[in-house]
Image (spheres, rainbow, N blue to C red):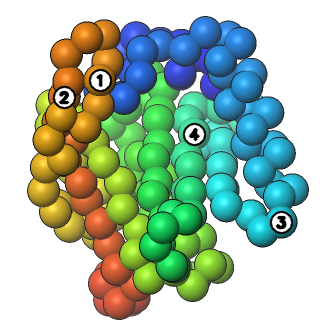
Amino acid sequence: MFGIYGDPRATEHMSFDPRTRGDVQAIVARSIASAAADPRQEYALAVADTGHDGGRVIGFGRLALDPHQPRAATFGFALNPDVWGNGYGTETVRLLLTCAFQDLDLHRVWGARSPHNTASARTMHRAGLTEEGYIREHVQRGGPWSDSITHSILDHEYTATATE
């Protein structure tokens, strides 16, 4: 995980600066603890490339239930830059959506991205999400505020795309 969250290339369009090893250890510990929480509010998954190096971790995905909206969640994902462009992002988002809609019976899932992250825009589009719009000055990283672009998908849209 540190190889991703500690990498300036991987975090270039994220809402945070590269993480320290201690930061990443805390994220992993929080993810493990959240798996045992009752009721569970967060679902995290490690993305592994099982075809190389015996299953090395190449990414991370997260689905977090929204405490303010019933049957809704936010999601995010990050991949090692060495594997960008190979479909892992789309596969990760689709797995998170399967969990959200098939396992958790949610109604709405949404995520945000940097306006500069066009690869993430393509990934979200391929996974069936609709671009909704801007959140102005949503993220502050290293001084200036930055906008975010939101994407979402509803349960009936997911069902329609899953059966295509």
Pointers 1 and 2 in contact (CB under 8 A)?
yes
**Which residue position holds label 1?**
140
Q: Quadrant of residue 144?
A: top left
In the picture, the disc for residue 146 is 2
On screen, residue 111 above or below 3: below
Q: Quadrant of the N terminus?
A: top right
Residue 3 image position (x, y, % from top left): 58, 16
Is residue 123 rendered to the left or right of residue 65?
left
In the picture, the disc for residue 38 is 3
Secondary structure at numbered mark 1: strand
Q: Quadrant of residue 103?
A: bottom right
Rounded to the nearest angstrom, the CA distance separating label 3 from label 2 is 35 Å
Q: What amino acid is at disc 1?
A: Gln
Q: Residue at x 67, y 61 (%)?
A: 41
**Which residue position holds label 4?**
60
Residue 10 image position (x, y, % from top left): 41, 21
